[in-house]
Image: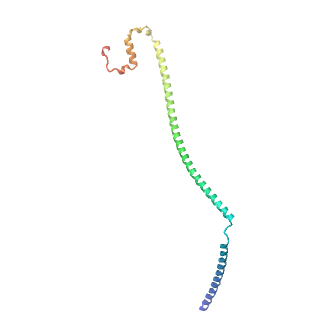
């Protein structure tokens, strides 16, 4: 490309830039005029402003209600957590009580079984005693009252309280 061609190209570009600058200045002036007109007009009518203020007040009220609801929900959640903890504790106590009841039922069953065995043993002993010949012929009067009292005292635990043993009765 020759110098002449380059100069012509630069001139064309300069003319295009000048035209573009002129267009932008005109558009700027138009926009400035529109801006001035818009600034002279009211932004919104008073009714719209009133409705906007009411809406903002409603939003503020609703926000307060939401905040209060959140606080109440947190409080209720804490109470629910406490109730769950108490339920778990009560369930543990119930399980423990049921276990103790089962143990007591087992002891009762064993006690009843032992009583039946003792009754059967006493019954068999009485049958055996009634079958012993000559037992009825032994006089009971051979024991003195003092000996009977000593035997009664022994069965009541009197032997546990005595510190000394009387060797003369032996």
Residue at far front of view = 46
Compared with residue 82, is residue 30 higher up or lower down, i.e. above or below?
Answer: below
x then y, percent, for residue 145: 38, 11
Residue 35 lies left or right of residue 141; in this view the side is right
40 vs 86, nearest the viewer? 40
Q: Quadrant of the N terminus?
A: bottom right
x then y, percent, for residue 56: 63, 60
Q: How many marks?
A: 0
x then y, percent, for residue 140: 41, 9
18 vs 155, nearest the viewer? 18
Q: How is the image coloured?
A: rainbow
Residue at far left of view = 168
x then y, percent, for residue 18: 63, 85
Residue shown at 50% from the left, 33% from the top: 100
Residue shown at 62% from the left, 86% from the top: 14
The image quadrant that residue 162 belongs to is top left
Residue 31 lies left or right of residue 129; in this view the side is right
Residue shown at 49% from the left, 26% from the top: 111
41 vs 27, nearest the viewer? 41
Q: Quadrant of the C terminus?
A: top left
Residue shown at 62% from the left, 88% from the top: 11
Residue 61 lies left or right of residue 133; in this view the side is right
């Amino acid at each position: 490309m020759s110098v002449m061609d380059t100069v012509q190209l630069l001139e064309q570009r300069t003319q295009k830039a000048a035209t573009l600058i002129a267009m932008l200045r005109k558009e700027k002036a138009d926009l400035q005029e529109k801006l001035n007109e818009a600034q002279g007009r009211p932004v919104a009518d008073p009714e719209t402003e009133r409705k906007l203020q009411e809406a903002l007040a409603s939003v503020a009220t609703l926000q307060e209600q939401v905040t209060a609801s959140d606080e109440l929900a947190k409080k209720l959640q804490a109470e629910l957590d406490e109730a769950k903890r108490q339920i778990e504790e009560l369930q543990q106590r119930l399980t423990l009580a049921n276990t103790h009841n089962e143990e007591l039922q087992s002891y009762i069953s064993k006690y009843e079984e032992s009583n039946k065995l003792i009754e059967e043993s006493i019954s068999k002993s009485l049958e055996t005693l009634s079958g012993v010949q000559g037992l009825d012929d032994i006089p009971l009067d051979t024991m003195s009252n003092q000996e009977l009292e000593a035997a009664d005292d022994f069965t009541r635990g009197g032997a546990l309280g005595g510190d000394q043993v009387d060797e003369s009765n032996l």
